[in-house]
């Protein structure tokens, strides 16, 4: 195993984040996930993706799939010590601890909650492994909420003893993903990596005359910066025709964010497209298209982006033009997960939607992994 291009994934879920890093040539040395259904989904989905993807890293067997042999509890000191034994010297640790205790729609217990405490499990693993880089993602509430912010800054202050960090609230929408998903995202590089690069002319702060290639690290370039500010169509009566005058007001470049475009070529033969809950409520036919301000039942609009993919706490997202909930494949499309990634039939629908809701959009992970790889390539060229 090439340790220069290997990473440990913790709180791995279905592996959406992992696929983004794998696409950029990072091998998953070990993945850690505690929920049985997620472990089965990870193994099945990642293997199906690696076998079918036409990317060169998979066709040429540069990157192989990683199998989670059994559910593992990342809080276990035994599991952590085994990770150190197996994976000492890996390039990175990536992960997004469960966010329900920091989420506005979740339990809101912060670091007092059983899941909120897991950000410090992440810290423990980083401290023991000492990778060259780290990637961390969580809900924006971990930073924006004053009560939860204390936990984040405690994590940040500890990490800054060994790492140079950058963090920001990044919205998937800005990167062309048809979903309003703002998340606290943090990337860090070990201090010796940054010092080496700075001593050889790379810059830590960007100015107009400095290009991205001269930076130690920079966030991926955004495709959109004002997508939420334009005039999107209002609510339309469900089951009726389109209002062309509303569509004409949308600048053409934003059409890639349409839910309709994300779903356009799906049919019953598409993998996981028939994975749907059966309709059971009158709300499936009474809620209008684009009425997404409700706490529970929200119907997507064909000519807008989706609200945050978060199918839990009684939140139900409805298809724009059909009297049903979204399918598993439609939800995966909104998370920018490739169709080559397939979830197995034997996993229940509730677990599938929970897994999708928890994931990092693959396209976003891919873009950030590309920038991390550039930093590491520059560093390894100097040693």
Image (cartoon, rainbow, N blue to C red):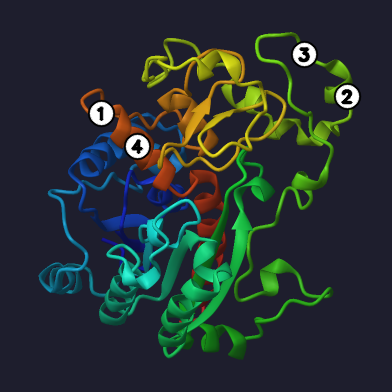
- Regarding mark 2 in the picture, which secondary structure is present there? helix
- Regarding mark 1 in the picture, which secondary structure is present there? loop
* Quadrant housing residue 90: bottom left
Of labels 2 and 3, the one closer to you: 3
Q: Earlier in the sequence, mark 4 or mark 1?
A: 4
Q: Is residue 87 above or below residue 155?
A: above
Q: Is residue 78 above or below residue 253?
A: below
Q: Is residue 380 in sight in this rendering?
A: no
Q: What label does residue 248 carry, if any?
A: 2
Q: Earlier in the sequence, mark 4 or mark 2?
A: 4
Q: What label does residue 348 carry, if any?
A: 1
Provide the residue designation for mark 4: 50
How far apart are labels 2 and 1 at the CA level? 41 Å
Q: Quick one: label 3, few (<14), some, or many (20+) residues within 10 Å?
A: few
Of labels 4 and 1, the one closer to you: 1
How far apart are labels 2 and 3 at the CA level? 11 Å
Q: What label does residue 68 carry, if any?
A: none
Mark 4–mark 3 CB contact (< 8 Å) = no
Q: Earlier in the sequence, mark 4 or mark 3?
A: 4
Provide the residue designation for mark 3: 242
Q: Quadrant of the C terminus?
A: bottom left
Tell which of 111 and 58 is nearer to you: 111
Q: Is residue 84 in sight in this rendering?
A: yes
Q: In the image, what residue occupies the spot 85% across and 24% down?
A: 246
Mark 2–mark 3 CB contact (< 8 Å) = no
């Amino acid at each position: 195993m090439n340790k220069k291009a290997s990473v440990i994934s913790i709180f791995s879920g279905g592996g959406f984040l992992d696929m983004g890093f794998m696409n950029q040539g990072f091998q998953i040395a070990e993945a850690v996930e505690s929920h049985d259904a997620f472990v089965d989904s990870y193994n099945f989905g990642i293997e199906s993706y690696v076998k079918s993807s036409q990317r060169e890293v998979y066709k040429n067997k540069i990157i192989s799939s990683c199998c989670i042999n059994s559910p593992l509890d990342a809080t276990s000191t035994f599991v952590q010590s085994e990770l150190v034994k197996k994976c000492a010297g890996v390039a990175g640790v990536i992960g997004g601890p469960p966010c329900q205790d920091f989420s506005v729609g979740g339990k809101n217990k912060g670091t007092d909650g059983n899941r909120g405490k897991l950000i410090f499990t992440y810290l423990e693993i980083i401290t023991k492994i000492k990778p060259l880089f780290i990637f961390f993602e969580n809900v924006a509430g971990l930073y924006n909420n004053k009560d939860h912010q204390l936990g984040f800054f405690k994590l940040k202050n500890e990490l800054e003893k060994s790492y140079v960090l950058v963090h920001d609230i990044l919205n998937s929408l800005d990167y062309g993903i048809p979903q309003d998903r703002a998340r606290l995202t943090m990337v860090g590089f070990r201090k010796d990596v940054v010092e080496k690069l700075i001593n050889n002319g790379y810059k830590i702060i960007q100015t107009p005359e400095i290009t991205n290639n001269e930076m130690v690290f920079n966030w991926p370039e955004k495709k959109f910066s004002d997508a939420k500010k334009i005039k999107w169509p209002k609510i339309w009566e469900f089951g009726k025709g389109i209002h062309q005058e509303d569509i004409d007001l949308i600048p053409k470049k934003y059409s890639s964010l349409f839910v309709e475009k994300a779903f356009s070529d799906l049919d019953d033969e598409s993998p996981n497209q028939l994975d749907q809950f059966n309709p059971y409520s009158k709300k499936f036919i009474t809620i209008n298209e684009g009425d997404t301000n409700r706490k529970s039942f929200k119907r997507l609009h064909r000519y807008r982006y989706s609200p945050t993919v978060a199918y839990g706490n009684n939140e139900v997202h409805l298809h724009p033009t059909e009297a049903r909930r979204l399918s598993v494949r439609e939800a995966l499309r909104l998370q920018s997960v490739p169709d080559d990634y397939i979830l197995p039939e034997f996993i229940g629908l509730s677990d599938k939607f929970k897994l999708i809701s928890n994931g990092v959009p693959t396209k976003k992970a891919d873009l950030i992994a590309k920038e991390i790889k550039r930093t590491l390539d520059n560093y390894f060229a100097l040693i």
